[in-house]
Amino acid sequence: MSASQFTADNEDASMIMSFDSIDDSGDQNLLSALTGLMGRFNIGDDGQLHYFGSQSNYHLMNSISDKSSMESTVSLQRRGLAAVERMGKNMPLSIALQEHLLELYWTWQHPWNYIIHKEVFSRAFRSRTYDRYCTPLLLSAIFALACRFSDCKELRTVGEDPNTAGSAFFEQAKILFLYESQAPIIATVQAAALMSMRALSDGQEALGWLYCGNAVRMALNLGLNIDCSQWVTSGLISEDEAEVRKVTWWGCFVLDKYVSTFDIKFPL
């Protein structure tokens, strides 16, 4: 993965755009009514769907914001990739080896650590174009875990030490996360959750708890915990997007419970 290989689709979204045009004249249950009073989804400066509470200024805004106030996610991803290359942390992999690691991930990690929608992710991966569902950061986090299931020595930083399998990808992911977390998308949440699992597998409990907290808080910021079925009905987001949001939030919820068992900490 390198900055020169990076391609992306829709970048320019600098409007704070409210979804008040949704027709809510039909029957609504009490929970939906209360949710509407408490906050709403808006598209933020970074072009991503966020949930803003009723006390947030963004809950009321419906105006154009300063385009330069926040870098786009793709711009930050490019900067992250450039930093990885500059620091000599880039780990190029052949397509065959990438697919090998993905197969290991789907076989051994995915069944019990369900946070990535396999079909949507695989579709994006096969297109060979990074988008909101498949990013360099997410791939690095996946590979950092999947390497633990491979006996391939070239995936280790120390050839004879299996404990170092995937360490280079984890270091790469840490750098990319510093950039992408400034304008997170769903893939950023997923990557943070996987990085939490990787840190815990290394015995780094504090770091694992930190990445878990990052994942949960970014998920809340993106409103992944909110039922968005009415936005699907209205055509504002796709069914795939809604399903990915649900899967990711459930994965964060389970991870939070899992990490809480390592120490006396308060889960969600």
Image (tube, helix red, strand yellow):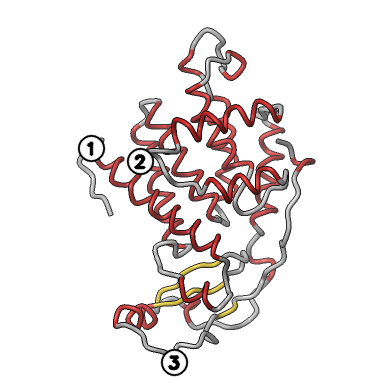
Q: The residue tagged with tag 2: helix, strand or loop?
A: helix
Query: Quadrant of the image for the N terminus?
Result: top right
x then y, percent, for residue 210: 39, 43
- Position of 193 compared to 179: left or right? left
x then y, percent, for residue 247: 44, 53
Residue under the image location 61 percent in, 82 percent down:
63
The amino acid on which the numbered mark 2 sits, given as a three-letter code, is Trp
If you read the primary sequence from the N terminus, does the residue marked by circle 1 or circle 3 appear first?
A: 3
The amino acid on which the numbered mark 3 sits, given as a three-letter code, is Ser
Q: The residue tagged with tag 3: helix, strand or loop?
A: loop
| Label 2 Cα crowd, 10 Å radius (few <14 / some 14-19 / many 20+) | many
If you read the primary sequence from the N terminus, does the residue marked by circle 2 or circle 3 appear first?
A: 3
**248 relative to 21, above or below:** above
Determine which residue is flagged by label 3. 25
Determine which residue is flagged by label 2. 209
If you read the primary sequence from the N terminus, does the residue marked by circle 1 or circle 2 appear first?
A: 2
| Label 3 Cα crowd, 10 Å radius (few <14 / some 14-19 / many 20+) | few
Instruction: Please identify, in this view, whether the residue under mark 1 or under mark 3 is nearer the observer.
Output: 3
Cα gap from disc 2 to disc 3, whole angstroms: 43 Å
Cα gap from disc 1 to disc 2, whole angstroms: 10 Å
